[in-house]
């Protein structure tokens, strides 16, 4: 059985983040072929190309963490109909210096939750555009816009609504299938 390493980003920095709860749930519901670990974005300074000649250790570690995984998963809220600035900042770090774009050929998927009925759909459209420019093969279907209602996911990451749990399980199974297909079509560089 091939195990794929998946690095996930939580787009929210909030202590009570509902998207962090969603990430916990996804870890529990993922098929055993996916090994998920968080790639933290919190400690990255604001990106400037002044850093390109000599990235600080935190940014080097960030890029190294992306290099070490087979795929990335974005679990993010929608802020003002886009992605949070902290997440955009992290993607900017990952994409640079020019020619060392960490997202190139790296399979990705996105998911998010919000109390609103469209559950991060507009923010995800922006994220798709960003990742297209970063040359990341993206899972286009199934899409996952999760409306959060109080108690939907417990602090331990248990999903309390069966149909939602089943959907999230299917989502992660689909992501596994997508990663497998990408690496069949685009063998990893250096392997
Ligand atoms: C600055 C800001 C902008 C927001 N904009 C949106 C929005 O565009 N769409 C939406 O559905 N919710 C929006 N919300 C509400 C968030 O969905 C809600 O705060 C949610 O808890 C954020 O996810 P998190 O808890 O994982 O940070 C916004 C919240 C903040 C703080």
Image: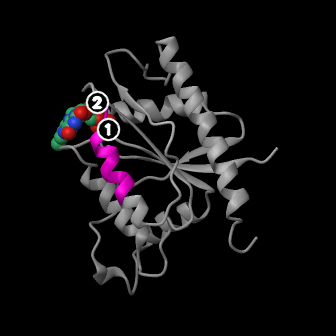
Q: Residues within 10 Å of mark 2 (few under 14, many from 20)?
A: few
Name the side, left or right, on which 141 lies relative to 183: left
Name the side, left or right, on which 70 lies relative to 90: right
Asked if residue 43 can be seen in this view, the reply is: no
Quadrant of the snapshot with the N terminus? top right
Q: Is residue 22 magenta?
A: no
Whole-percent x, y for residue 163 in the image? 50, 14
Asked if residue 106 can be seen in this view, the reply is: yes
Please determine whether, in this image, residue 139 is positioned above or below residue 64.
Answer: above
- Quadrant of the image where one finds ligand 1: top left
Verify CB contact (< 8 Å) between mark 1 and mark 2: yes
* Quarter of image, res 177: top right
The kind of secondary structure element at disc 1 is: helix
Please determine whether, in this image, residue 66 is positioned above or below residue 36.
Answer: below
Name the residue: 57% across, 65% down.
105
Quadrant of the snapshot with the C terminus? bottom right
Name the residue: 28% across, 49% down.
83
Residue holding disc 1: 121
Name the residue: 58% across, 27% down.
169
Residue holding disc 2: 118
| Label 2 CB-ligand 1 distance < 8 A | yes
Q: Is residue 128 magenta?
A: yes
Nearest to the observer: residue 120 or residue 64: 120
Whole-percent x, y for residue 101 in the image? 47, 73
The kind of secondary structure element at disc 2 is: loop
Whole-percent x, y for residue 59 in the image? 42, 69
Magenta range is: 119-129
Res 62 label = none
- Report the residue that reaches farthest toward the left: 80
């Amino acid at each position: 059985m091939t195990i794929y390493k998946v690095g996930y980003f939580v787009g929210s920095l909030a202590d009570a983040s509902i998207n962090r709860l969603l990430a916990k749930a996804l870890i529990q519901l993922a098929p055993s072929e996916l090994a998920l670990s968080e790639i933290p974005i919190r400690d990255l300074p604001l990106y400037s190309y002044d850093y390109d000649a000599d990235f600080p250790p935190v940014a080097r570690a960030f890029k190294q963490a992306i290099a070490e995984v087979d795929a990335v998963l974005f679990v993010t809220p929608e802020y003002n109909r886009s992605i949070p600035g902290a997440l955009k900042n992290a993607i900017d770090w990952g994409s640079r210096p020019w020619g060392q774009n960490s997202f190139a050929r790296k399979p990705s998927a996105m998911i998010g939750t919000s109390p609103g009925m469209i559950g991060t759909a507009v923010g995800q459209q922006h994220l798709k555009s960003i990742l297209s420019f970063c040359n990341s093969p993206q899972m286009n279907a199934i899409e996952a816009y999760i409306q959060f209602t109080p108690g939907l996911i417990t602090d331990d990451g248990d999903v309390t609504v069966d149909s939602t749990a089943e959907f999230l399980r299917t989502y992660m199974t689909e992501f596994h299938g997508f990663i497998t297909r990408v690496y069949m079509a685009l063998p990893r560089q250096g392997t």
